[in-house]
Amino acid sequence: MVKKYAHVTSCQVKVTTKPWERMKFDNKGHAHSFYREGKETRWTEAVVTKTNPPSAEQFTVNINSGFYDLEVLKTTNSSFVDFWRDELATLPDMPDRMLSTKVLCQWKFVSTDLATLQQLPFDAIFAGAKRNTLDAFANDPRAWVHASVQTTLYIMADRILNDFAAVDDVYYALPNIHYFPFDLSKFGLKNLQSDAEVYMPIADPSGFITATISRPAKGKF
């Protein structure tokens, strides 16, 4: 800039990096899946309700736990094709794409009995929920075949319910964080479709996918 333009006396360039950590499974770095280390927040809430007011001797305890702001990204093994199209659709089929989201995960426990809840391995359930979230995102082959965010969400929740009988339902919110190839053709460079190497984050518009996956209701008889 300062060499090309005589009227420019100074030029400042600032580059900011947001480091990604490679996901590890069995102590091996994953080929194409990453996350931001230490960015997520773990939380728990409890609601105590009297069942025979005004007596405080009988009550139920509802506990919800979860985490949010777990940012993940994979650079391949994700697609979005054959979706519903109408006159407003602008997104083309994407047989291979980057997939990134900032995970919010919440689970509710089956029991409302305090004595039962006190015996639950809360730390192990949290660790398992996070592990299943990352593993389903990076490794579950069902997420490759049916690669929509909606299917990936279901797989994550299904794995948590299968692993932990104490969990009654799982809620996920997975907002899309889009990275699209930047058109460099005006600079004489190929960077679209199979040639794409440089991607640009796009804030809006983007999808916001949520769902609650629950165990089947038990019959009364």
Image (cartoon, rainbow, N blue to C red):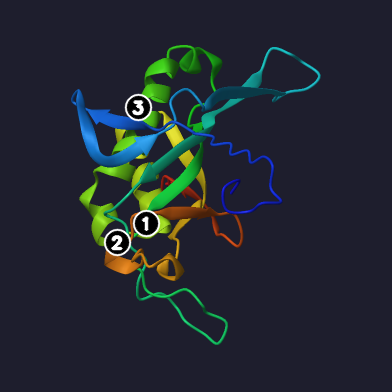
State the residue at coordinates (35%, 71%): 81
Graded by Cα atoms within 10 Å as few (under 14), some (14 to 19) or many (20 or more), the crowding at tag 3 reads some
Q: Position of residue 21 (x, y in %)?
A: 36, 29
Question: For residue 199, what is the image quadrant?
Answer: bottom left
Q: Which three-letter amino acid code belongs to the residue tagged 1? A: Thr
In the drawing, does residue 32 fall left or right of residue 102?
A: left
Question: How many circles with numbers are drawn on the protein?
Answer: 3
Q: Nearer the viewer, residue 152 or 62?
A: 152
In the drawing, does residue 163 fall left or right of residue 57?
A: left
Q: Nearer the viewer, residue 190 or 138?
A: 190
In the drawing, does residue 28 fall left or right of residue 221?
A: left
Instruction: Give the Cα distance between marks 1 and 2.
Output: 6 Å
Q: Nearer the viewer, residue 30 or 181?
A: 181
Q: Are marks 1 and 2 in contact (CB under 8 Å)?
A: yes
Name the residue that disc number 2 marks.
146
* SS assignment at label 3: helix
Graded by Cα atoms within 10 Å as few (under 14), some (14 to 19) or many (20 or more), the crowding at tag 2 reads some
Q: Which three-letter amino acid code belongs to the residue tagged 2? A: His
* SS assignment at label 2: loop
Q: Are marks 3 and 2 in contact (CB under 8 Å)?
A: no
Q: Nearer the viewer, residue 21 or 54?
A: 21
Name the residue that disc number 1 marks.
151
Name the residue that disc number 3 marks.
128
